[in-house]
């Protein structure tokens, strides 16, 4: 498993200051999602990790929905920085 290939969009100073910000939480969830995805490519039958991945995906989705309602500009910038897709709207 490759551990050091994850993104570092947020600088070290920003990490220390804004650990509770929506952007930092989405950033950390995205790192966890990418790490779990690479783990699941090797271990296809690890169902507990699959469940954990689905839970983290749901949390990140709820945070992104909240951010898109509160501040669309910050939401678009974060989506662009993390290179994740915008969710489908019903």
Image: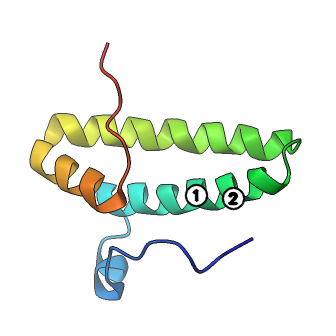
Q: Residue at x 31, y 37 (%)?
A: 86
Quadrant where the N terminus sits is bottom right
The residue carrying mark 2 is 38
Mark 2 secondary-structure assignment:
helix
Pointers 2 and 1 in contact (C-beta within 8 Å): yes
In percent of width and height, residue 60 lies at 45, 44
Asked whether, in this view, residue 9 is left or right of residue 42, the answer is left
- In the rendered structure, find residue 34 and report the number of the disc placed on it: 1
Asked whether, in this view, residue 88 is left or right of residue 50, the answer is left
Up-down relation of residue 81 to residue 56 (above or below): below
Tell me if I can see residue 21 in this picture: no
Residue reaching furthest to the right: 45
Tell me if I can see residue 30 in this picture: yes
Asked whether, in this view, residue 60 is left or right of residue 36, the answer is left
Residue reaching furthest to the bottom: 13
Residue reaching furthest to the top: 90
Up-down relation of residue 5 to residue 69 (above or below): below
**How many angstroms separate mark 2 from mark 1 (CA)?**
6 Å
Q: Quadrant of residue 7?
A: bottom left
Q: In which quarter of the image is residue 21?
A: bottom left
Up-down relation of residue 27 to residue 64 (above or below): below
Q: Residue at x 36, y 64 (%)?
A: 24
- In the rendered structure, find residue 8 and report the number of the disc placed on it: none
Q: Which residue is drawn at 49% across and 41% down?
A: 59
Q: How crowded is mark 2: few (under 14 residues within 10 Å), some or many (20 or more)?
A: some
In percent of width and height, residue 87 lies at 35, 31
Q: Quadrant of residue 22?
A: bottom left
């Amino acid at each position: 498993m490759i551990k050091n290939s994850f993104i570092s969009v947020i600088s070290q100073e920003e990490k220390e200051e804004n650990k509770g910000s929506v952007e930092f939480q989405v950033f950390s969830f995205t790192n966890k999602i990418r790490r779990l995805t690479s783990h699941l490519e090797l271990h296809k039958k690890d169902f507990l990790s699959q469940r954990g991945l689905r839970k983290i995906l749901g949390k990140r989705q709820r945070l992104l929905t909240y951010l898109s309602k509160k501040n669309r500009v910050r939401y678009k910038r974060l989506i662009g920085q993390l290179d994740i897709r915008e969710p489908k709207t019903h």
